[in-house]
Image: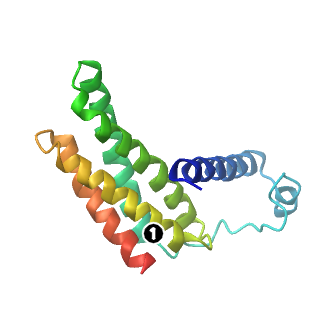
Amino acid sequence: MNRRNLLELLTTAGLVTAGATVAAESSGSSDHDMQNMPGMQGMHDHSGMMSKYPDLIQSTSKCVNSAEACLAHCVAELTSGNLEMKNCAITSQDVITACTALRQMAARNAPRVAEMAAVCGRICRDCEAECKKQEAHKVCRECRESCGQCAKACESLAA
């Protein structure tokens, strides 16, 4: 499975999880009602449960925010003809996808957080390297910094 397929799978899983959560919250459904939703059999309501990964959630959130700003800047630069920003835009989008998925998994204490953190850390390192090439742009510097911090958090968890 290549990285793109993995990210598509993780994005879909995240959307399903988010959709189920929104549906449950909006309908005031019980744990039993959640059991009747497709793909939710065997799950329990852990809404009061705290995440074991608060630092990872904070790090991925910061990384997503800075990558979104970087991506918006890259798109503006690309639109004006600066094709040097292409790879920076691509890696920023990858970070947004991976860190969002990891953040969601960490928030619910998913069993494969450490494995996802290993992949996410590598994706953050890729973005960090690309943003370093664009140091003249403030948003790229900020993205590089947050990707480096997030990569460290991911690597320490994955180790």
The spot of residue 7 in percent (x, y) is: 54, 50
The spot of residue 105 in percent (x, y) is: 57, 63
Q: State the colouring used for the structure image.
A: rainbow
| 88 lies left or right of 14 | left
| 145 lies left or right of 5 | left
Q: Residues within 10 Å of mark 1 (few under 14, many from 20)?
A: some
Q: Residue furthest front?
A: 1
Asked if residue 72 is positioned above or below residue 30 in the image, the reply reads above
Quadrant in which the N terminus is drawn = bottom right
| 15 lies left or right of 125 | right
* Residue in the picture at 23% in, 47% down: 131
Q: Which residue is mark 1?
A: 118
The spot of residue 28 in percent (x, y) is: 77, 51
Asked if residue 78 is positioned above or below residue 152 in the image, the reply reads above
Q: Nearer the viewer, residue 20 or 119?
A: 119
* Residue in the picture at 69% in, 49% down: 16
* Residue in the picture at 62% in, 52% down: 14
The quadrant where residue 158 appears: bottom left
* Residue in the picture at 53% in, 55% down: 101
